[in-house]
Amino acid sequence: MCRCVCALYIYDYFIRGNIDKDAVFTQTKKLDSSFEFNGLRFRVNISLSGDVPVFTLRLIKNELPTFDELGVPDIVRRMMYQPQGLVLVTGKTNSGKTTTLNALINEINETQNKKILTLESPVEFKHKCKQSVIVQKEVGYGQDVLTYKDGVKNCLREDCDILVIGEIRDRETAEIAMQAGQTGHYVLSTIHTIDSIEVITRLRKIGVSDYDIASTLATSLSQRLVRRVCPKCAVKREYTEEEKNIINGIAKKYGVEYDFTGKYTYDTVGCQYCNNSGFYGRIGIFEILNMTEDVKELVIKGESSLEIRKKAMEEGYKPLVIDGFNKILNGYTTLKELNSKLVIY
Ligand SMILES: [Zn+2]
């Protein structure tokens, strides 16, 4: 099925399409695009490994998960929506950043009358306008706009309320995101880094000034995905003393202590439903850095992420592992699974 769809895509893109394939490859050295076929939406990535083209095809789900389904805590939901400034979603590759970003757009779309412009490369989820008006533009050679910079200029001309920039990868994109955030827009984007505090280091590295970071970055959210235990075959049991010690040993460093009374965990088994993996579906674990006045002051002074982390912790910042423990104690996942993603013991 996948090969067949991929072949059709290539036919459509290169042979029937109006795009000059040589020019595209010369410009970008790769293709990252999305398309619809038979009511399904796919993302296709084509790159060269030596002289050999490598094709990756991914099916994009039609329905976006809600914040509840993603496991986004209420505090995160409240902090993520700001009147203006920049909110960044961060995480490793395949940590669900784009899904979270789109789930937030969806939530705003269902509840608020806003004008939203998205600049994406490529467009994955196609939003339908509900309460908000959403215009989605694809960025790249032969697409709606050539660069993010051009797209942002359009946005400022059209006076949108919310601007979504698919990913900040370079200084130019970071600077235009900052400019839009400084001129009364709510800007949402993703950036590739390990946690919400390292976003500051990453922005500094790509050339954004401490002043711009402190004045524009409102919140950064970091996330990972962990597998959910299979509801059909998982076996409920009490926590071992070793598990309790590991969890509370780490949690205490962040001012948290768990009471295991009446709490259970699960052993994964495997059945037909979960393809014998013991897990079914995934859930996000999250952490958030709120840019308080004290944190901004440290950023302006050029302090290291170590100092910023200390201050954030004094002000209640909780790292990914704490939300991971919350997800374990609520029965969504296991300590072993969390450790396989975060390496905590
Ligand atoms: Zn199962």
Image: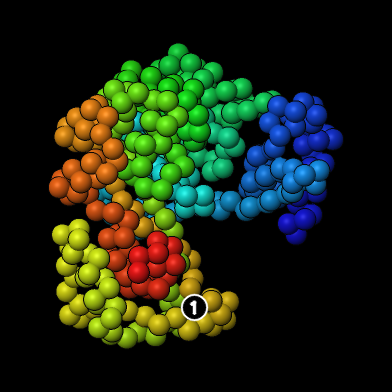
Q: Is residue 173 above or below residue 280?
A: above
Q: Is residue 5 left or right of residue 306?
A: right
Horizontal and vertical percent position of residue 35: 67, 42
Quarter-of-image position of residue 297? top left
Tell me which residue sits at (32%, 79%) in the image.
Answer: 265
Can residue 103 be seen here? The reply is: no
Task: Please state, as top left, top right, bottom left or bottom right, where the C terminus lies in the image.
Answer: bottom left
**Is the residue at mark 1 in contact range of ligand 1, meaning its CB lies under 8 Å from it?**
yes
Q: Is residue 239 left or right of residue 160?
A: left
Horizontal and vertical percent position of residue 52: 80, 46
Can residue 142 be seen here? The reply is: yes
Q: Residue furthest right?
A: 15
Viewer-side residue, 322 vs 303: 303
Horizontal and vertical percent position of residue 272: 57, 81
Callout 1: 10 Å neighbours few (<14), some, many (20+)? many
Q: How many marks?
A: 1
Horizontal and vertical percent position of residue 266: 37, 80
Residue assigned mark 1: 278
